[in-house]
Image (tube, helix red, strand yellow):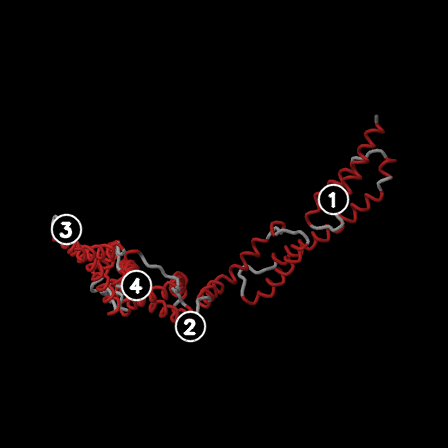
Amino acid sequence: VQVIIDAAAFNQAIAAVEQIPETIDYKSISLIQAAQKAIEAVTDSAASAKLAAQKQKVQDALGKWNAIDEQVTAVENLIAALPADVKPSDAAKLDEIQQKIDELKELGVETSDIANYSVYSAAVENLAGALAEIQAVRDQIKALPAAEDVNFADAAAINGAEKAAKNLQAKYGEKVLSAEDLAPLAAAQAKLSELNDARKALVEEIANTQLNITTAQKDQDAIQALRDKVTELEALETTFTADELKNLVDAEKAMAELLKQSEEAHAALAKLPAQDEVLYTDKAAIDAAQKMVKDLEGKDTFTEEEQAKLAAAQAGYQDILDGIAQVESDIEALPDEVTPDQLNVILQIQHAISALAERK
């Protein structure tokens, strides 16, 4: 039974040593210690003697870890040597400590492994706090877009930079920021103010401009000019409310509807037949064209040719009505008993009826 226990412990020791990585870092200590404990658990002297290579690997790993730990201690000593009131002249010392901490991080050391890291952190903060705060505001102002690139979306950044500058001046005095520091902020504020003025002026123009809804090019251009101004400002990252654009949007809708009606009216006139080609069934089309022209009175213009074509179509339809009336009158005038000498009259009526039939 003792042999079985030793064999199990022996195998566990080998397995534990195999868990130790080839490259040792500060985090490897738990694996090293576990391997030490596993080797110590092998109580059989013969079995223990066979673990010489494993014992050496553990000792080598522990030596490497101790070397890292000595570097940690060295950094702790450097931190402990820092004066309580760190001055700018101590910057080199802080840089040296930071460099060594960075090197230790590559070896798996966390700042929490450095016992007095908080002292170092406080020293860095005390030394750089005010300068960092001032530089942060300078950087915030420098990050603002050039005046020519400012748009409405930059308002938050500009207002934020202005607030930060005022807070800094209230804390450290007006001269904490030079005129050169503040120049980009002043330029951006001026451009943003210009954009806001332009937006306000456009909203007032849209609200107060009387937009005429006719097909006249000048009236179409007036509406398009306002839309172009809106588009230009929208490209600079602003938006308009429905109320602000209501007058323009209503005019655009009305103009679109008018142009559609105009197109339909001109197309209807173009389709009207010539006077001698008008059919009795063309009445609806002629009446519709006439109504379209009347509805667009004062809003659209029609050429003399179009007006003449409508008049001709109406006249052609009237010709049909007159022809019907004439035939009815001629038939009414026939005697109850037709005689051979009235043959020509009958033939004329028949001819008139045939002519009218062709225009049904």
Residue type beneath disc 4: Ala
In the picture of the structure, the residue carrying the numbered disc 3 is 338
How many neighbours does mark 4 have within 10 angstroms: few (below 14), some (14-19), or many (20 or more)?
A: some
Viewer-nearest residue: 163 or 245:
245
Q: Position of residue 354 (x, y in %)?
A: 25, 55
Residue type beneath disc 1: Ile
Residue type beneath disc 2: Ser
In the picture of the structure, the residue carrying the numbered disc 4 is 270
Q: In terms of sequence position, does the residue under pointer 1 or pointer 4 come before the other?
A: 1
Q: Are marks 2 and 4 in contact (CB under 8 Å)?
A: no
Residue type beneath disc 3: Val
Callout 4 secondary element: helix
Q: In terms of sequence position, does the residue under pointer 1 or pointer 2 come before the other?
A: 1
**Quarter the N terminus occupies:** top right
**262 left or right of 24?**
left
Viewer-nearest residue: 43 or 342:
342
Closest to the camera, between mark 4 and mark 3, is 3
Callout 1 secondary element: helix
**Residue reaching furthest top?**
1
